[in-house]
Image (spheres, rainbow, N blue to C red):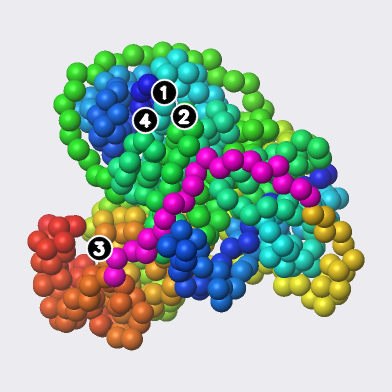
Amino acid sequence: MSVLVYSESENGKLKKSSFETASYGKALSEKLETKLICVSFNCSDSKLLVKYGADKIINIDNANLKEFNSKKHSHALSQIIEKENVSLVILSSSADAKYLGGYLAGITDSAYVSNVVQLPESINPFIVRRSCFTNKAFSSTEIIGDLKIISISSNSFGLKENNGDGTLETINIKEIETSFKVSNIEKQSGKVTIADADIVVSAGRGLKGPENWHMIEELAEVLGAATACSKPVSDMGWRPHSEHVGQTGKPVSSNLYIAIGISGAIQHLAGINSSKIKVVINNDPEAPFFKAADYGIVGDAFEVIPKLISKLRARL
Amino acid sequence: MNILVCVSNVPDTTSKINFIDSDSKFDKNGVQFIINPNDEFGLTKAVWMKNSNNASVTVLTVGDSSAEAILRKCLAIGADKAVRIDCEAKDAFSVAKEIVLHCENIKYDLIICGRESIDYNGGLVPGLIAGYLDYNYITNCISLEIDSGKATCAREISGGTEFSECDLPLVIGAQKGLVEESDLIIPNMRGIMMARQKPLEVSKAQNINSKAIDNKFFKPEEKGEVKLVKSDELDKLIDLLENEAKVI
């Protein structure tokens, strides 16, 4: 019996979510009185996971597993699951982790529950709390099976340092044959992504047109935030689909969500509800977003945002 | 080419979410059900492929008879045939297993599911199907072209797009971008009339045990009042975010 955490990395370096999944994995492995194994792929700094309680770190070094593929990575992980007698697998909520989870559950015929928001309510039976109905509700879900896989919502547990004396093992696993081939990856460099961001600055139709987005981008830059938008804005083509947050877009669970000129339709609020602190800036005091927010400013975005930017700049 | 589109019957996006039977069941009373939006993007793409790839499109749902309304709508949108596997959908695992058993009898070149349903948001079904059937698999799929048994696809990844190629059979998790919102097909009278002539087959479920059981539902705690800050007191907002909320 052991707990396995899939530790994601990018360009050979651990992602921040990997420290949260390791922290969660440690807390759980202590409850289960078992060891925590963190598994990374082609990662040069996975030793850092010792600081978050990893008892053993396995880094799989294989150039053919450089680009993420749920099939290849699932088969690699399933070999370790078998070898290390793993009973519980912990994943983050990233696009890749969710891409992996279902497939891994399929090939190992195991149970998988995503969007878990806290440590299990009970170990035997194994009951977790997860969000559902796009954050309009939570469910207490019992998971059945010898192998269980869970994805934890980002920022739901946080980082907990836990100095261990974990060992690092580098192994090579033979990848499975597949016709799947990545031909190209297009990535905007130097931009904070919605999934990884602590702060998200989001704007809606109140901005009046795509030409006014420079102030949203500037505010995001000052705060080190990601930019996002409401559904109408992406439907009208003012901003790319990848920025659309809400029920049919991306979910947001940042520490701070700033909504500018977004009225707060129920579908939008559902998607951003698990963000910790919500700030709304809108000139309509009746906008539904004011009911969902922690802090609010009734005012014209075109006046408030430039002032806010200069005040934040002065503070740094 | 044979395409299967798996759809689920979900509460409309504006639905109020309530629970009954000591908070153990979703309250369907007064709720309007729709085709899961991510599934509908996938269905639209499949209907396009009837022309571009000479495809035949079967739409399938796992659910009780109340789910037939959305199957009829899928037929009116352009699917050729509908299948309902007759049981109450319990969890992603049992739903995926029922679909897999169906696919062991009828071979499909392409299986399209939504990236996730907007009710349980698990995002499990396409991956489970691909894993059980050992098919290729792409989720968050925003582009797909198929030519002589080879698929060229794009997947939305964190901060960008990944382009890939693979052989069929393939399972995809569809989302907005695969087709646009404005591409969604609103059934016309002719489509609705034709849908009545199309086959809707009800098949027996295998009654697979669940692996995840929702024991109890909770609603989020009520939020406190919003703290309003005057638009000329931005220092106060910054102070609250820094020292009270501790988020900047």
Secondary-structure class at tag 4: strand
* Contact, mark 4 vs mark 3 (Cβ under 8 Å): no
Mark 3 crowdedness (10 Å alpha carbons): few <14, some 14-19, many ≥20:
many
Q: Name which residue type carries label 1.
A: Val
Q: What residue type is labelled 3?
A: Ile
> Circle 1 sits on which residue?
A86
Q: Quadrant of residue A158?
A: top left
Query: Judging from the image, what secondary structure is the residue with disc 3 in?
Result: strand
CA gap, disc 2 and disc 1: 7 Å
Distance between the Cα atoms at labels 4 and 3?
A: 28 Å
Question: Residue at image x 63%, y 61%?
Answer: B9
Q: How crowded is mark 2: few (under 14 residues within 10 Å), some or many (20 or more)?
A: some
Say whether marks 2 and 1 touch (CB < 8 Å): yes
Among the two numbered marks 2 and 1 on one chain, the one whose residue lies closer to the N terminus? 1
Q: Residue at x 57, y 31 (%)?
A: A109
Q: Are marks 2 and 1 on the same chain?
A: yes
Q: How far apart are marks 1 and 3 (CA)?
A: 37 Å
Which quadrant, please, contains the C terminus of chain A? Answer: bottom left
Q: Mark 4 points at which residue?
A: A5
**Residues tagged by mark 4 and mark 3 found on one chain of the structure:** yes
Residue occupying the point 66% across, 30% down: B134
**Magenta region, residue range:** B203-222
Residue position marked by numbered label 3 in the rendering: A277
Q: Mark 1 to mark 4: distance in Å?
A: 10 Å
x then y, percent, for residue A200:
32, 59
